[in-house]
Image: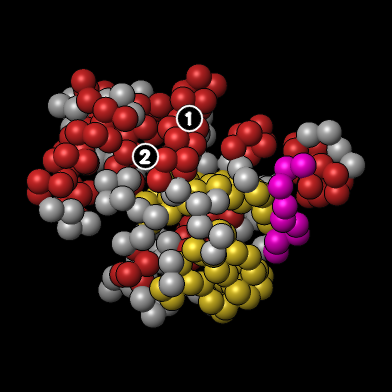
Amino acid sequence: MTAIISVTGLTKKFGEFTAVDNVSFDVQRGEILAFLGPNGAGKSTTIKMLTTLLELSGGKIVVNGHDVMTQPFEVRKTFGIVFQDPSLDDELTAYENMEFHGVFYHVPKQVRAERITSLLKLVELWDRKDEAVKTFSGGMKRRLEIARGLIHHPKILFLDEPTLGLDPQTRNHLWDYIIKLNNDENMTIFFTTHYMEEAERVAHRIAIIDHGKIITQGTSSELKKQTKTKSLEEAFLKLVGHSIRDESASAMDQLRMGRRMWGGK
């Protein structure tokens, strides 16, 4: 296996606050990596740097052979992303949301039509393709966001808490789709979640970040052995502690970053 994501000395500062502190890790091609941590640990900030949405303060990220600082447009062609917050246009239909995204990624018209049909059928939304997204349930919207993120056949899929707020049946259904994509297309999956059972079930490997630093990496079995615990949740709590974290750091990150791509002035 070869690394499709290589991160070296990654740092992000907001004034005097260091959100991500000299982080280094690799993700292998075809790997499913769970990126875990408490609130405000630096997970979403790291994903935003990996996906060119946030400028680096220091270090280097190479995605599929492209440097995120010097080749951001090439990097964006290689990944799909499902954000923590909904990003669909509720006034458009499911098909129109897919069409718009395909045009944005310059997918040829004939290919675009074929992929929209295939993907909407994959996520079982073809029969609802002409309905406004504002009429969809949370689970349906999540499925549509995943389909939309795949329209340009990305090599990497980033998922930032993709099942947040979904019922257990919908969560399991979504992960079945994602595992199938990984198996059938060797797609690399990089995801964050607060559901430890998801990470334990799905991830090939786990990295845990706390206070902006990677504190450990390994398989679920390795982390349980390291901490002498019986579940990933117990291992996680032993590594990061039981105290409740506030989200002030994360909120400050969002406030100062805004929504504008730093490469798209």
Residue 165 forms part of the magenta stretch = no
Amino acid type, residue under disc 1 in the picture: Asp
Q: How many marks?
A: 2
Q: Residues within 10 Å of mark 2 (few under 14, many from 20)?
A: many
As drawn, the label of residue 176 is 1
Quarter that holds the N terminus: bottom right
Tag 1 secondary structure? helix
Amino acid type, residue under disc 2 in the picture: Ile
Q: Quadrant of residue 76?
A: bottom left
Q: Quadrant of residue 251?
A: bottom right
> Would residue 108 appear left or right of 21 to someone viewing this image?
left
Identify the residue at horizontal 64%, vertical 69% (top origin).
24
Identify the residue at horizontal 59%, vertical 64% (top origin).
26
Between residues 224 and 240, which one lies in front from this camera angle? 224
Q: Quadrant of residue 127?
A: top left
Tag 2 secondary structure? helix
Q: Which residue is mark 2?
A: 146
As drawn, the label of residue 193 is none
